[in-house]
Amino acid sequence: MRKLKAIWELMRLEHGLMLFIAVLIGSVIAQKMLDNFTGFPPVDKLILTFITVLFLEASTFALNDYYDLEIDKKNKRLDRPLVRGDIAPKTALYLFFILLPLGILSSFFVNFTCFIIALVTAFFAILYDVKMKKIKLLGNFYIAYTMAIPFIFGGAAVLEKNMLTFFVIPPVIFIIALIAFFAGVGREIMKDVMDFEGDRKSGVKSFPSYVGIRVSNVLSAIFYIIAIALSFIPFFMESYGFYYRNMYYLALVFVTDTMLLSTSLQLIFKKRVDMKFYRIFTLVAIFVGLLAFLIGVFTG
């Protein structure tokens, strides 16, 4: 059981499940737009997109921990199984080389657009783990991209099998992806602050290295506030269908916004913030936000 728990932690499978919820949201929105607000995405495509997202996420997290082992040791990241010695580093590599190709292959059977999205995302994932991580200003935006792209991937999965698919994805999906992107950048800057000492000792340049911890906290808060502001657009825009004046969506997204706003106020006005707590707190907030979009699309 300990080994299985360590493998779960290495691959962050809970993140994979959250990413699939994002894919499901994008798929249902696109399918309902195609079928005049009726119908459900084909089960085979949902299974293939689930495999794609889960395997790409799991493999790149395994590679991430392999390359981050020394930095994680300096940051005393005992939540990492490689740091604790529960899993050998070579096991992380084996998982990467097995799961990544399987994830890309499964996307090929969805459609060509999804295959291209998976291929590009996998390329940047490897680039991030091997090189981009040392330039955290870029790495932060890449991580935020991985939080946003599943919505678009899901939308593309149920549309026609050509490259024009990307251009007919419903606009509401792009708004949702933007919300996820800005919230993701906010969380990554918080992580930069949390890992600042270990990053500095390892020569990794992050936001706090350039602008300091206090300014980094304010920047993180600004990204959260942008995400909060964007979250109201679907509720007030009639063209966004499911979410227009949808009180179920509004109630849940209000919970998310309240959590993100309270985090933002802490970041702006407090000199010392418990980053470990608020990283978990904002992850819960984002999960509630996912539920808001998921329930909104079924009740709108």
Image (cartoon, rainbow, N blue to C red):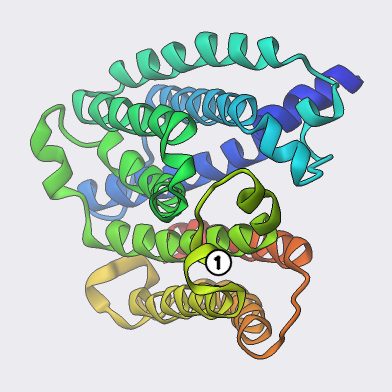
* 287 with respect to 135 (left or right): right
In the rendered image, the vertical position of residue 8 relative to residue 209, given as above or below = above
In the rendered image, the vertical position of residue 292 relative to residue 75, given as above or below = below
Q: Please report the residue visible at 72 percent of the width from the left and 84 percent of the height from the top.
A: 271
* 40 with respect to 88 (left or right): left
| Residue 155 on image: x %, y % | 30, 44
* 299 with respect to 278 (left or right): left
| Residue 94 on image: x %, y % | 60, 8
- Residue 276 seen anywhere in this rendered image of the structure: yes
* 124 with respect to 61 (left or right): left
Figure quadrant of residue 14:
top right
Q: Please report the residue visible at 36 percent of the width from the left and 57 percent of the height from the top.
A: 177
* Between 241 and 156, the one nearer to me in the picture: 156
Q: Quadrant of the C terminus?
A: bottom left
- Residue type at numbered disc 1: Pro
Figure quadrant of residue 280:
bottom right
Q: Please report the residue visible at 38 percent of the width from the left and 40 percent of the height from the top.
A: 40
Element type at marker 1? helix
Figure quadrant of residue 150:
top left
Q: Mark 1 highlights which residue? A: 208
Q: Please report the residue visible at 51 percent of the width from the left and 78 percent of the height from the top.
A: 250
In the rendered image, the vertical position of residue 221 relative to residue 124, given as above or below = below
- Residue 24 seen anywhere in this rendered image of the structure: no
* Between 234 and 58, the one nearer to me in the picture: 58
| Residue 241 on image: x %, y % | 29, 68
